[in-house]
């Protein structure tokens, strides 16, 4: 279970664990509010951390709407919702930088992915899909300098913790085409 220290964090996570429709979409806040007798705009305010006074009956409705046991939503712990099928994005209002947003990411990925580079030296070798996953991972702790070892470690960790649907997306034809385009660009630069 991820670290979810606040009620808004747990509510946001539980929301992303809800079943999705045939198109892969989550229910809207408005639909959850309507279907469970919650006041309009309540879920959005709770997600943003604006915690109004909530009556006991409203608490019970929230637990039912988000399909989680009351103790978990209130305090956290291990008995939370089933894991989400896709990565849970940052909660609105929470600032975050992804590894791929760092200026050195692409050049270091190109360097470690070159023939004989650090990616090939790993057992098993780090794949392009793992670097795609790493680029989307949020930097949890500020780093003064991005190093080849950190790039490889972030890519491997992001892949190992990626949700099933995210792995499928990283290994899609579009992702492979993008990775191949990057390899061709690196080869052309190396030939200069």
Image (spheres, helix red, strand yellow):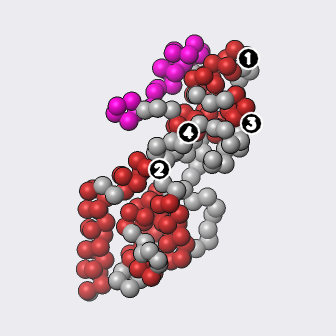
- Residue with the mark numbered 2: 163
124, above or below 12, in the image: below
Q: Secondary structure at mark 3?
A: helix
Point out the tag, 3 or 1, that comes first from the N-terminus: 1
The residue singled out by tag 1 in the image is 56
Q: Residues within 10 Å of mark 2 (few under 14, many from 20)?
A: some
Label of residue 82 in the image: 4
Question: Which of pointers 1 and 2 indicates the residue nearer the eye?
Answer: 2
> Residue 191 at x, y = what percent?
26, 86
Q: Are marks 1 and 4 in contact (CB under 8 Å)?
A: no
- State the image quarter where residue 125 is shown: bottom left
Would residue 34 be counted in the magenta stretch? yes
Q: State the separation of the CA atoms marked 4 and 2.
A: 12 Å
Point 39% across, 30% down: residue: 21
Q: Which residues are magenta?
A: 21-40
Number of other residues with Cα within 10 Å of mark 3, as a class: few under 14, some 14 to 19, many 20 or more: few
Mark in front: 1 vs 4: 4
């Amino acid at each position: 279970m991820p670290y979810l220290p606040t009620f808004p964090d747990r509510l946001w996570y539980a929301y992303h664990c809800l079943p999705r429709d045939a198109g892969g979409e989550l229910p809207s806040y408005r639909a959850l509010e309507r279907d469970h007798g919650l006041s309009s705009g309540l879920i959005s305010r709770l997600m943003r951390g604006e915690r109004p006074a909530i009556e006991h009956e409203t608490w019970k409705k929230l637990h039912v709407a988000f399909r989680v046991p009351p103790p978990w939503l209130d305090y956290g712990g291990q008995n939370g919702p089933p894991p989400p099928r896709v990565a849970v994005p940052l909660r609105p209002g929470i600032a975050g930088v992804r590894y791929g947003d760092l200026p050195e990411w692409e050049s270091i990925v190109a360097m470690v992915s070159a023939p004989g580079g650090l990616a090939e030296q790993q057992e098993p070798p780090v794949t392009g899909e793992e670097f795609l996953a790493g680029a989307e991972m949020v930097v949890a702790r500020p780093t003064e300098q991005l190093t080849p070892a950190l790039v490889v470690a972030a890519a491997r960790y992001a892949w190992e913790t990626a949700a099933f649907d995210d792995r499928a997306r990283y290994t899609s034809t579009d992702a492979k085409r993008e990775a191949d385009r990057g390899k061709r660009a690196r080869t052309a630069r190396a030939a200069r």
